[in-house]
């Protein structure tokens, strides 16, 4: 299912090489027909916008959104676990899931980086991919709504992902997530304060089921299982 790989590719740091292959991305999305027409039109607008931007401006926009706005982070576990002690074992488990599927991370990104997760889903059967996407749907939808608040074309990718999943986002969970952070741009002082708050506590409400960013179903439940410190294997439930 190359559609999911393309959607992840659109969320990677912009480069001249990325822009050069956007026409191929359009063809894949059109031919696989996994995305509804309305969502596909928004993806086309995103790609047209990317093609019309100076690459340095495009990179600056990307950094302002995904690197300088914590609530728009593309690292899924930041929305689920924050900086709690649960994130480390979850990252280890996710890395092992990738290895079990024959994938080895060759970038500097953490395994919960959304484009990496989507690349993993792209090698599964369509049904398995949808089921695994279901588990992260509230996180994905919340990021998408925040991007809409920023009037960003990147919101189209998250709308497409929401359409591809079986399960629809929980409106109450999304509302709660947006109340906590609408995705607005921060001053440097506000950014420092938000990171400080994130790193100051463990077991904050953002790590719980009712926080608006709940853990995923079967796959993320596996990610969250505790790890034996000696064997580095999952402990039984």
Image: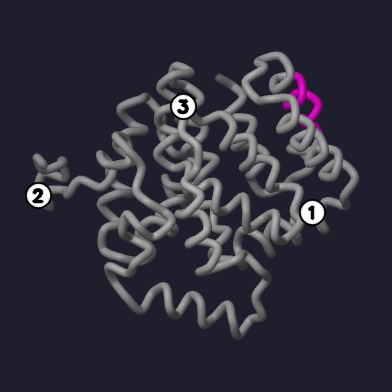
- Identify the main secondary structure in magenta: helix
Image point (44%, 39%), residue name: 105
- Could you tell me which secondary element the residue under label 2 belongs to? loop
111 left or right of 182 in image: left
Q: Residues within 10 Å of mark 3 (few under 14, many from 20)?
A: some
Residue 237 sits above or below residue 129 on the image = below
Q: What's the magenta region?
A: 20-27
Identity of the residue furthest to the front in this view? 172
Q: Which residue is mark 2?
A: 230
Q: For this view, does 212 lie left or right of residue 150?
A: left
Residue position marked by numbered label 1 in the rendering: 58
Q: Position of residue 22 (x, y in %)?
A: 78, 31
Query: Is 46 covered by the magenta stretch?
Result: no
As drawn, the label of residue 170 is none
Compute the Cα span from label 2 to label 3.
Answer: 34 Å
What residue sits right under mark 3 in the picture?
130
- Asked whether the residues under the numbered discs 2 and 3 touch, taking CB atoms below 8 Å apart as contact, a structural biologist would say no
């Amino acid at each position: 299912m190359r559609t999911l790989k393309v959607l992840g590719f659109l969320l990677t740091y912009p480069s001249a090489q990325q822009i050069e292959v956007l026409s191929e991305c359009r063809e894949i999305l059109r031919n696989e027909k996994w995305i509804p027409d309305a969502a596909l039109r928004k993806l086309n607008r995103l790609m047209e916008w990317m093609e019309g931007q100076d690459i340095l401006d495009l990179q600056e926009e990307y950094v302002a959104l995904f690197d300088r706005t914590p609530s728009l982070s593309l690292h899924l576990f930041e929305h689920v676990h924050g900086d709690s002690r649960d994130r480390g074992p979850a990252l280890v488990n996710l890395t092992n899931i990738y290895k079990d599927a024959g994938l080895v991370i060759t970038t500097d990104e953490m395994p919960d980086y959304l484009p990496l997760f989507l690349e993993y889903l792209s090698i599964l059967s369509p049904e398995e991919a949808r089921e695994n996407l279901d588990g992260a749907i509230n996180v994905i939808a919340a990021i998408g709504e925040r991007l809409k608040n920023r009037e960003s074309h990147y919101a189209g990718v998250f709308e497409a992902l929401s359409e591809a999943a079986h399960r629809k986002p929980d409106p109450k969970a999304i509302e709660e997530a947006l109340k906590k952070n609408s995705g607005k741009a921060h001053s440097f002082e506000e950014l420092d304060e938000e990171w400080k708050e994130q790193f100051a506590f463990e077991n904050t409400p953002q790590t719980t089921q009712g926080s608006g960013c709940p853990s995923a179903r079967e796959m993320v439940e596996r990610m969250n299982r505790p790890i034996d410190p000696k064997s580095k294997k999952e402990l039984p439930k």
